[in-house]
């Protein structure tokens, strides 16, 4: 799935891990901090442009997911990563990582209030 242009901070709970700016496949990133409690799988060997892309892509539905186009239309968003990640804050069931956007929730508590645990 095409990512589009997206800028944010990869978070674990309320710990800032890595700032990123992605424009499809052009990636800028800057590690911010470490979390001794949890390291996302994609960053087990450190931060890199490829790891940031992989982390973002892993948080998107498969292009051929049944009903994806219809769901995007229903919510008035384009079927690109930029829109889907902004709606979901990059949340994935089973972990506490998320994306902090300048215009979105700023704490993990706010994200959990939106999406549940």
Image (cartoon, rainbow, N blue to C red):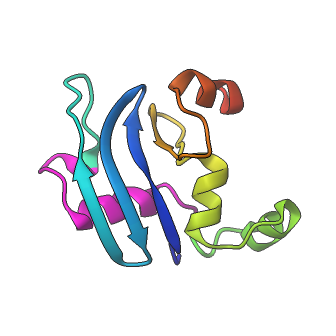
- The percent position of residue 60, horizontal first and vertical second, equals 54, 60
- Taking the image as shown, residue 21 lies to the left or right of residue 47, namely right
Tell me how many marks there are. 0
Residue 86 against residue 62 in the figure, above or below: above
Instruction: Work out which residue is located at the far front of the displayed protein and give it.
Output: 102
**Residue drawn 52% across and 78% down?**
2
Q: Which quadrant of the view contains residue 38?
A: top left
Residue 94 against residue 88 in the figure, above or below: above
- Taking the image as shown, residue 80 lies to the left or right of residue 11, namely right
Considering depth in this image, is 17 or 67 the residue closer to the camera?
A: 17
Q: Which quadrant of the view contains residue 116?
A: top right
Residue 94 against residue 102 in the figure, above or below: above
44 falls in the magenta region: yes
Instruction: Work out which residue is located at the far left of the displayed protein and give it.
Output: 45
**Residue drawn 54% across and 42% down?**
91
**Residue drawn 58% across and 56% down?**
85
Which quadrant is the C terminus positioned in? top right
- The percent position of residue 109, horizontal first and vertical second, equals 57, 21
- Taking the image as shown, residue 59 lies to the left or right of residue 47, namely right
By secondary structure, the bulk of the magenta-drawn segment is best described as: helix
- The percent position of residue 67, horizontal first and vertical second, equals 77, 68
Residue 5 against residue 20 in the figure, above or below: below
- Taking the image as shown, residue 7 lies to the left or right of residue 87, namely left
- The percent position of residue 78, horizontal first and vertical second, equals 72, 73
Q: Which residues are magenta?
A: 42-61
User: Is residue 9 something that shows in the picture?
Assistant: yes
**Residue drawn 58% across and 62% down?**
61
25 falls in the magenta region: no
User: Is residue 117 something that shows in the picture?
Assistant: no
């Amino acid at each position: 799935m095409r990512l589009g242009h997206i800028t944010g901070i990869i978070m674990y709970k309320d710990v800032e891990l890595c700032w990123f700016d992605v424009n499809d496949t052009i990636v800028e990133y800057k590690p911010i901090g470490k979390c001794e409690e949890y390291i996302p799988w994609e960053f087990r060997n450190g931060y890199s442009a490829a790891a940031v892309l992989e982390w973002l892509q892993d948080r998107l539905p498969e292009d051929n997911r049944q009903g994806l186009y219809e769901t995007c239309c229903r919510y008035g968003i384009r079927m690109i990563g930029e829109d889907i990640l902004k709606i979901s804050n990059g949340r994935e069931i089973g972990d506490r990582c998320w994306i902090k956007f300048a215009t979105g929730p700023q704490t993990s508590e706010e994200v959990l209030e939106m999406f549940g645990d």
